[in-house]
Every structure is written in C-alpha cells, then in structure tokens.
Image: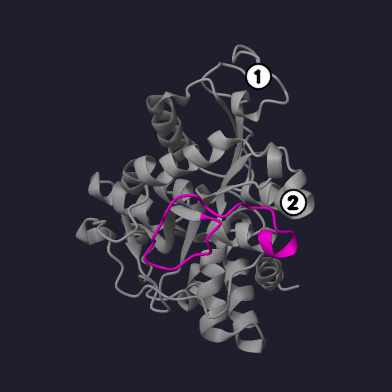
Amino acid sequence: MNLFKTIVMGLTCGVLVAGCGSQSSDDTAGEEVIIYSNADEEAVEVIQEVLDEAGFEGQYIFQSFGTGELGGRLLAEGKNIEADMVTMSSFYIESAQAKNPMFKALAFTANPQIATPNYYAPILSFTGAILLNTKEMEANNLPVPTSAKDLANPIYKNQISMVDPNGSSTGWLFVQDIAAEYGTDAEGQQIMNAIRENAGPNLELSGSGPLKKVMAGEVPIGFGLRHQAVANKAKGLPIDFVDPSEGNYTLTESVAVIDKGEKTNPKAMKMAELIVTKARPGLLEIYPNIVYDGETVAAENQIDNSKTYPEPLTAELLDKHRAFFHGE
C-alpha cells in the first residue's frame, strides 16, 4: 500500500471538524470518533458508506495517512495518540501493542481463518505478483520471468519497475520472496542488488507506481498487487501476471480500538464491529483474498502457492528488510 498518500481528512461534514455539531468534551459518547487509517481511498469509501448507513453519519472524523507515517505515530505515541480507532497494517498494530499496550480487547467475536490476537480483527488482505505488459514483452523480445530471482537477469536492465519498501508495504511483499528463499546474506544480497539495479530509474515509492508504468508501456515488467493485474487483464488490456515460483506473500490490514480507559469512546467499538461485519463484503470485492471462513473468490483470484512468513512480521523486521533491499 502507498506509504506517502495525501492525508485525507473529514468526510460526512465536508471539513475536518466544522459542521458536525458540538458535544461536551467530558461526554465521550457524544464526541466524534477519530479514525486513523492507512487504507486506500476505495476502501475508505466502503467503510464510510457502511458507517453512514448504520446511522453514524456526522459522528466520526476520518484521517488517512501513509502506512509508514501512521506506523511511526502508533509506535511513538501509544495510548496518547489522538485517534479512537485505527485501520492499519496488522504487523504495525502488533508492534505497537508489544511496545506500549494501547488497544482494547474486542467486544465482539471475529474468527479469521488465521488466528489473530484479541485486540484486532482483519478487514482486508492483498497479495503481490510480477506484472507484465504483454505487448511490450513481445516488442522487446523478452523472456517471461517465472521467479522473483529471474528479475536479476541483466536482460531486464531498465525493463522492470519495483516498489521501494521505504515507500510502500507492497515492496515488502517482493523482498520477502528473496529473503525467505535465498536469505539476506551473500546470495540473497547479490540477487537483491541486481534487481534494484535493473529497476534503475523505475524504483517507485508508491505501491501502484509499477502497475501504472506497466500499463502505460513505460516498462514491460513490474511488481505490484496481484488483484489489480487480474482485474486489468479481465478488461482485455495487455496486462498479465506471474505468480513467482518462490511463492506469493500476503499482508493484512485490521481494525483496532484505542484503550483510553474511562475516556474510551464507546462508539468506536461499535464502529469497529460494523467495519468487520458489514464492510467486509465490499472490501472483499476490492481485495479478493479470503480472510474469513465462508468467503469465496473467483478462480483467477485463488492462489496456489501462498506462503507463510518464516518469522513474525514486525516494524523492526521491516526496517531490516528495507536495509536489505537497499544493500545497506
């Protein structure tokens, strides 16, 4: 996901605070719920619609941040953060909780297929893949890569676009392929360096950057979100994708409520439950990865070689892998 998205504030009231009515500062039940989120715009729209339809229009303030910025605030501010609720990368929620316990146990039941701590519930997930512009592949007479490692081949010099994990967690999905399969020492570092050098000027901070370049024909190959390539291929565009032989990795985003003791806004937990129970179908349409039992996705969105992370995801591991990506 994009870590440098423009902060998008406010929603139902038109501006951040004005127009939402005024409540007593010591009456948390009457205050707007402040929601911090790293979600993409289309996911935010689904969440807003669900909250508004449930009668919460005008009772919340939505602020969107890049993942890195919001993650840094969670780690630094803990319970002192202004937000009442967050939707955020699950690994950042866990890292923040480990550093300074700040989230309430959920007051509702959520049973994702993969067990999670009791203080957050997944709301969406996304998977990475190698992206192809089939016309440009043919025009440049390039072989179709079958693995992440293949992108280190000198034949792809300046022909690929990659996501910098300093800018987007989408880039971390690719780094995991290399780190898990080839390690972060000599072999893995050599491969990673060659891939980064092949990307050259096409190293993107935005998670959608490589897809945009591939779709525009600026490069034949990129790395990005699998479901976006599937959707564009279905539209008849010259876009295809390759599931790397090393496997596909997935990241989840979840909702959690800040534990502010007596100052905890009771509406925050109700909204969190709505997002999990009512927004999930709409989010599944956008991000067609199964998270809960009973969900189904089209065959083209089913992943045959989904991988499990070899070690727990943490903010510290992300920093380590960012350095690995850059050869530091």
Q: Vertical placement of 264 versus 126: above or below?
A: above
Residue type at tag 1: Val
Depth check: give the residue in front, 143 or 98.
98
Q: Is residue 45 above or below residue 30?
A: below
Residue at the spot x=43%, y=56% of the render? Answer: 125
- Residue 278 in magenta? no
Instruction: Determine whether, in the image, residue 159 is placed left or right of residue 325.
Output: left
Residue at the (54%, 77%) spot, across then down = 178
Protein image colouring: one colour
Q: Residues within 10 Å of mark 1 (few under 14, many from 20)?
A: some
Determine which of the numbered discs, if any, sits on residue 17 in the image.
1
Q: Residue 128, how many percent across, how many down?
A: 44, 62
Q: State the SS at label 2.
A: helix
Q: Looking at the image, is 233 positioned above or below residue 196?
A: above
Of residue 289 and residue 93, the one placed in the foreground of this image is 93
What is the three-letter code of the residue carrying label 2?
Answer: Gly
Percent of width and height locating residue 244: 40, 73
Number of marks: 2
- Secondary structure of the residue carrying numbered label 1: loop
Disc sitting over residue 78 in the figure: 2
118 within the magenta span: yes
